[in-house]
Amino acid sequence: MNLIKLAKKFRADEDGAVTVDWVVLTAAIVGLGIAVLTSVSGGTTSLADKISSSLSAMTILTH
């Protein structure tokens, strides 16, 4: 009798399913963030190099 109650309680408990959903959602968000960083990193490096060379070419006037 006690085993039957335990089995029914186990089937009705959805905490594990909710946890799996959150883990999958978190993994998807992290994966998307990594994909965005990978695709944008080349452009930002190029832009930083252009800014650096532009600033290096400038002269500072002193009195």
Image (tube, helix red, strand yellow):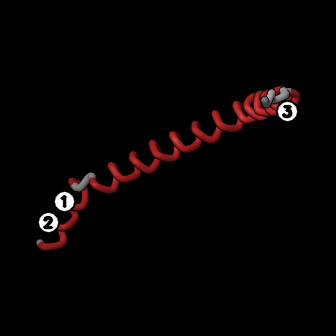
> On the rendered image, what quadrant is the N terminus found in?
bottom left
Left/right placement of residue 10 relative to residue 44 reads left
Left/right placement of residue 26 relative to residue 8 reads right
**In the foreground, 40 or 27:** 40
> On the rendered image, what quadrant is the C terminus found in?
top right
**In the foreground, 38 or 29:** 38
> In the displayed structure, would residue 60 be above or below residue 15?
above
Kind of residue at disc 1: Lys
Check disc 3: other Cα within 10 Å, few if <14, some if 14-19, many if 20+.
few
Kind of residue at disc 3: Ser
Left/right placement of residue 25 relative to residue 51 reads left
Q: Earlier in the sequence, mark 3 or mark 1?
A: 1
**Residue 41, percent from left and from top:** 73, 35
The secondary structure type at the circle numbered 3 is helix
Residue furthest left in the image: 1
**Residue 42, percent from left and from top:** 78, 33
**Residue 22, percent from left and from top:** 39, 47
The secondary structure type at the circle numbered 1 is helix
**Residue 16, percent from left and from top:** 33, 56
Check disc 1: other Cα within 10 Å, few if <14, some if 14-19, many if 20+.
few
For image coordinates 63% across by 41% down, the residue present is 34
Q: Quadrant of residue 15?
A: bottom left
State the count of labels: 3
For image coordinates 34% across by 51% down, the residue present is 17
Pointer 1 with pointer 2, Cβ within 8 A: yes
Disc marking residue 5: 2
Q: Earlier in the sequence, mark 2 or mark 3?
A: 2
Kind of residue at disc 2: Lys
> In the displayed structure, would residue 18 be above or below residue 45?
below
